[in-house]
Image (tube, helix red, strand yellow):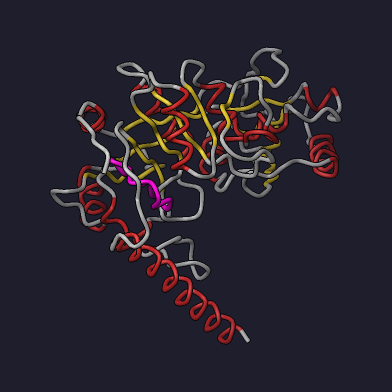
Amino acid sequence: MILAGKILLWLASQLYGLIVAVRNKLYDLGILRSHSFNLPVICIGNITVGGTGKTPHVTWLAGKLSEMMSVAVLSRGYLRKSRGFRMVSPEDDTVSVGDEPLLMSRSLPGIRMFVDRDRVHGIREIMRREPSVQAVILDDGFQHRAVKAGLNILLTDWHRLMTRDRLLPLGRLRESLKEMRRAVIIIVTKTPREITAKEMDVIRDELGAGAHRNVYFTTLAYGKLFSLTGSGQPAVTSSTSVLLVTGIADPSPLQQYLSGITSRITPLAFPDHHRYTGKDVAMITKAFDRLEGEEKIIITTAKDAVRLKEITIIADHVREAMYYLPVKVQFIADEEKFLNKVYQYAGKDHTDS
């Protein structure tokens, strides 16, 4: 039975790969049209399913690029209930715009954030409504071939490099590794801080870095805890009991970080982009009440926090114990080199095609 299941997965993976390859070939041949625009379009994406850290990288780059020009960020707005093109404001909710766009809007108050499943339409609307915008960053648009981004930045998780993965459903690859060729820059995310130059060179070789492609390495830097109720910051020590509530693709880096502070961690993981229900709140409450010790708190991610803040049925003692841990991107090396490449592209002249 196990062998038969593996064979079925392999066959499904081959069929999926064929369908994706045909689609990409139609775009390569021009049978399906890719649209270019007369302003810089920077795409940050991946070829794997979730967990590479797109949101903190988009947030980081948008903040850096906004220092030299007017920037807009365009996202699909995954799992939102609204349709079409929409501008995102910090006062919106996750049902209307999605959790990641809302988080970015609140993290980047000076940057215009939009959602539209049709990226071509979205960019056109940004250009029509916001003529002062000088560059657009596409959040997770690598597979959206209808837009021909001028600069494709591809992310891959250090713990599961795309070169060591397989096509869906056998693995987590959305498309063939051949499509790496469309990327000008590759960023290896969640890299251990202690990585050596030799180890980075080995990864660069594995990723096929050449004259047309640059490979950089980033890690995650966690900030200070913020209360969901604005009640200040707790002092987490080795005696603190932590209920770690997450609804992200890969909570392991966060758990590993917290384990360096306290060993008293109880993980409670939900699926990525999980929309919390009353049943989930009851589960969280029960798990929190079961924690031992006088010092106990709930820690979650910034993305989960935007969803949890909207739930009104959380008991007061549970809500007051909830804190979220923001995360930022840090380059292991060559940050200025990376930014110079992006700035150089963003400063070029662009013409319609």
Residue 342 image-quadrant placement: top left
Q: Is residue 138 left or right of residue 213?
A: right
**Residue 263 appears in view:** yes
Quadrant into which the N terminus falls:
bottom right
Q: Is residue 156 magenta?
A: yes
Give above or below for 1 relative to 133: below
Quarter holding residue 308: top right
Residue at image location 74% in from the left, 25% down from the top = 295
Residue 7: in magenta span: no
Q: Is residue 187 visible?
A: no
Q: Residue at x 72, y 42 (%)?
A: 275
Residue 137 in percent (x, y) is at: 39, 33
What is the magenta range? 143-157
Give the x, y percent position of residue 261. 56, 31
Quadrant housing the C terminus: top left
Q: Nearer the viewer, residue 271 or 19?
A: 19
In this rendering, would 36 be left or right of 97? Answer: left
The residue drawn where x is 43% and y is 35% is 123
Residue lying furthest left in this view?
Answer: 211
Query: Splitting the image into 4 quarters, where does residue 9 fall?
Result: bottom right
Q: Residue 231 vs residue 329: left or right? A: right
Q: Is residue 74 above or below residue 4?
A: above
Is 196 situated left or right of 133 in this image?
Answer: left
Q: Is residue 90 above or below residue 94?
A: above
The picture places residue 298, in percent across and down from the top left corner, at 71, 31
